[in-house]
Amino acid sequence: MRKTSSTNTQNLKQLMVLCPISYTLSVMGGRWTALIIDRLVKQPLRYSELKRAIPPASERVLTLQLKELEQDGVISRTAIVDTPPKIIEYQLTDKGHSLVGVLTQLYEWGKNNRHAVPIPG
């Protein structure tokens, strides 16, 4: 986490004010963010279900990205404590659902243009 008083943090805040595209990209910037949102579009999922749906993501990275998405208001985290063990469930917020159209356009663009870039394998 950056210091809130650093020049870099202040510049980033200015950029978010000046450029809505930069704000959108900062929210979508995590490696697994688009996939997390895609998995939560249809229904809320428990952490373990998300982990199974995105196996290459490490637990640390998945947890960090879920926290960031929650801080950005894209997803909500609900603890269901009726039955032991406590169950944590994630779902998209209205703000998260509003990103689906953006992701659809990004998907189409990527599908149509990724052939031009060699994918390491």
Image (tube, rainbow, N blue to C red):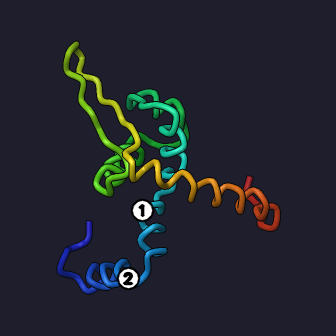
Q: Could you say where residue 45 lies in the image, as x and y percent from the top left?
A: 42, 30
- SS for tag 2? helix
Q: CA distance from mark 2 to mark 1?
A: 13 Å
Query: Which residue type does callout 2 highlight?
Result: Leu
| Quadrant that contains the N terminus | bottom left
Vertical order, 45 against 107 (above or below): above
Q: Is residue 65 visible?
A: no
Classify 10 Å Cα crowding around label 1: few (below 14), some (14-19), many (20 and above): some
Residue 58 picture quarter: top left
Horizontally, residue 117 falls left or right of residue 107, namely right
> What residue occupies the far right of the structure in this picture?
115
Residue 15 is labelled as 2
| Residue hosting label 1 | 27
Task: Look at 54% across and 33% down and name the residue there.
Answer: 53
Q: Amino acid at mark 1?
A: Val
> Percent from the top left, x then y, of residue 28?
47, 60
* Residue 63, position as x, y percentages in the image: 35, 44
